[in-house]
Image (tube, rainbow, N blue to C red):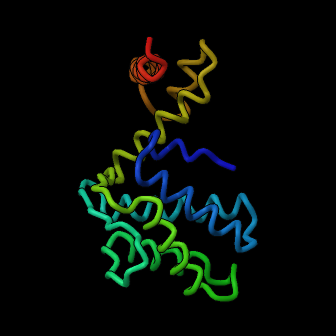
Amino acid sequence: MTEFEEFGVAGPLRLIAFTVAETLRAEGVDGAEADEIARRVAWAIADEFGGQYWFVPLHDGAQEADPPLILFVAVVLEREVKGHVSDARALAARCASECRKMIGGDYLYVMRGASAKRKSRDQKIWNAFTGTNYRALSKEFDLSEMRVRQIIQKQRERRAQFRGK
């Protein structure tokens, strides 16, 4: 199973991607394919709702109308899973319900698509970093070597902060 690190440590996009992937796996969709569909759903959310706060009501069984964010999850997911499952609409509705259970009862900030993509790129740079390959990473990601060094330093600081050092 993937970590969906490109969406931040505990951000709503990461939670939605996890929920979508797990729901798809439960329906028999292959793990790698489920992860890829979940990523496409999360990126679509970032592009559509990025830079905004959303309140997602608690999922308490009431037939309260879903907020646009959750409805969007269902629409995108239905489009993405057509041909992969027999009843795409029912799966999309189930998945949207699971997302509401997971993130309901709170205000969520959805990163802008550009911010999420930058975070994703920075995470990929960190994962590919060997300790000495600044130049190779600068060429691979079309950045200056200085910018790659800054990204690596920022990732080190972030990880040290999470470890409490």
Question: Where residue 125 sits: x, y (%)?
Answer: 53, 30
Q: Quadrant of residue 63?
A: bottom left
Q: Going by the picture, which residue comes out furthest to the left? A: 52
* Position of residue 95 in the picture relative to residue 55 (left or right): right
Q: Can residue 79 be seen in this view?
A: no
Which residue is located at x 69 percent, y 82 percent?
A: 85
Question: Where residue 6 sits: x, y (%)?
Answer: 50, 44
Which residue is located at x 52 percent, y 74 percent?
A: 77
* Position of residue 107 in the picture relative to residue 134 (left or right): left
Which residue is located at x 42 percent, y 23 percent?
A: 158
Q: Is residue 152 above or below residue 14?
A: above
Question: Where residue 45 sits: x, y (%)?
Answer: 39, 63
Residue 149 vs residue 46, the one in the foreground: 46
Q: Is residue 17 above or below residue 11?
A: below
Quadrant (top left, top right, bottom left, bottom right) of the C terminus:
top left
Question: Where residue 118 sits: x, y (%)?
Answer: 40, 41
Residue 45 vs residue 117, the one in the foreground: 45
Q: In this view, does 26 lie above or below 122?
A: below
Which residue is located at x 70 percent, y 66 percent?
A: 25
Q: Can residue 9 be seen in this view?
A: yes
Q: Is residue 133 above or below residue 80?
A: above
* Position of residue 129 in the picture relative to residue 74 (left or right): right
